[in-house]
Amino acid sequence: MMKFSQFSYLLLFLAFFSCQNNSQKETTNTEPKAAMKKAEPVKWVTYKAKNNPTGKNILLVTGDEEYRSEEAMPQLAKILSNYHGFDCTVLFAQDPEQLGTIDPNYSFNIPGLEKLADADLMILFTRFRALPAEQMQHIDSYLTAGKPLMAIRTATHAFNYKDTTHAYQHYGWRYDGDKNDWNLGFGKLVLGETWYTHHGHHKHQSTRGIIAPNAADHPITNGIEDGSIWGPTDVYGIRMPMPNTQSIILGQTVNRAGEYDEHDAFYGLKETDTEVATANPAAKKQYNPNDPMPPIAWLKNYQIPNGKGGTSFTTTIGSATDMVDEDVRRLMVNATYHLLGMEVPAKAKVDVVGTYNPSPYQFHDDAHWDKLNLQIADYVE
């Protein structure tokens, strides 16, 4: 009996040791796999409204090298979400090798454009993008369906294709190929104008918004007084007439009263500046920028070939620093309601959400963006 018990204990001991050893091996084998597994990068940010009675969904597309769309559009999205009950998603330019990191200088990739299939409104703020065909097809399908579009600032020259074999080269801002309807590209056909010149002295003259004749009663001007819109950027020259358009706001060019300050986000320009410009000192051929004043915000009835008719709203004022102005923000919010076919508030709430200290508009080299290392995850709330 004693011998049998000792033998039993020996078997139990060996079995226990074997289990411990196998457990140790399993832990050793799985730990490196867990350590190697990385979290999926955040490639876009969504701001869900606490209450969205209409179920409206807005997609904001950023990607410009100069006017800080990556700062302006998250703020606009938060205003539309927090105060107006729209679900908003913001997309960003990213190098495929650095997904999750914002790189305005990378012109060939904006993840998430497939979300346009479920969007009720696209707000576009890009400059000279050369997106791959698989991404452009989502934009093309959206416009073919005649869905509404808001285009901000550089969106008049949103795309730039040097490759004449690209399936969507006709979207390029200087297109002059066989597709005659697409002459001068997306900007001309869908918005009414592409880029051809600055209007005003860059960083030395600002822009004040004057309500266009016959637009005082338009719902997009609700809560906006004549002259209350102001931005430190000059705007873009517009060749008139623009067929099938309605001017909403005209841009009055204003001289700087104080000194130029390269360290100021507004470059020394102030909303209190009042002197109306009669010349643009930087122009090779002199002209009076206020004779006539160009439209800086307008509506257009658009229709791309083989597509349904739709409505676009374009504003050439709207850099990140322009959006410090309350009525620049209100202009965009009002246009959102109008494009969605909704009643525009008498005076829409457009208070800044959180902290908003936009960077001055300017170009930066790749080293700047590498050092800044802007993470989309930091925009998530």
Image (cartoon, helix red, strand yellow):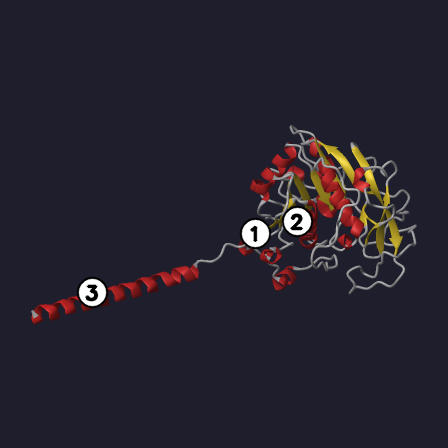
Q: Nearer the viewer, residue 43 or 154?
A: 43
Question: How far across and down, in percent of the image, does residue 98 sit?
Answer: 55, 56
Q: Is residue 201 left or right of residue 188?
A: right
Q: Nearer the viewer, mark 1 or mark 3?
A: 3
The amino acid type of the residue labelled 2 equals Thr
Q: Is residue 373 left or right of residue 190?
A: left
Instruction: Name the residue at 79% across, 34% down.
Output: 245
Counting labels gives: 3
The residue that disc 1 covers is: 43
The residue that disc 2 covers is: 62
Q: Distance from label 1 to label 2 (Cα)?
A: 12 Å
In the rendered structure, find residue 15 and report the number of the disc placed on it. 3
The amino acid type of the residue labelled 3 equals Ala
Q: Distance from label 2 to label 3 (Cα)?
A: 63 Å
Q: Distance from label 1 to label 3 (Cα)?
A: 50 Å
Sequence-wise first label, 1 or 3? 3
The quarter of the picture where residue 193 lies is top right
Label 3: element kind: helix
The amino acid type of the residue labelled 1 equals Lys
Evaluate whether residue 155 shows in this view: yes
Q: Residues within 10 Å of mark 1 (few under 14, many from 20)?
A: many
Label 2: element kind: strand
**Most distant residue in the front direction:** 1
Instruction: Name the residue at 62% across, 42% down.
Output: 163
Question: How far across and down, in percent of the image, does residue 191 sit?
Answer: 74, 38
Q: Quadrant of the C terminus?
A: bottom right
Evaluate whether residue 194 shows in this view: no
Label 1: element kind: loop
Sequence-wise first label, 1 or 2? 1
Q: Nearer the viewer, residue 95 or 57?
A: 57
Question: How far across and down, in percent of the image, does residue 374 sit?
Answer: 62, 59
Q: Quadrant of the N terminus?
A: bottom left
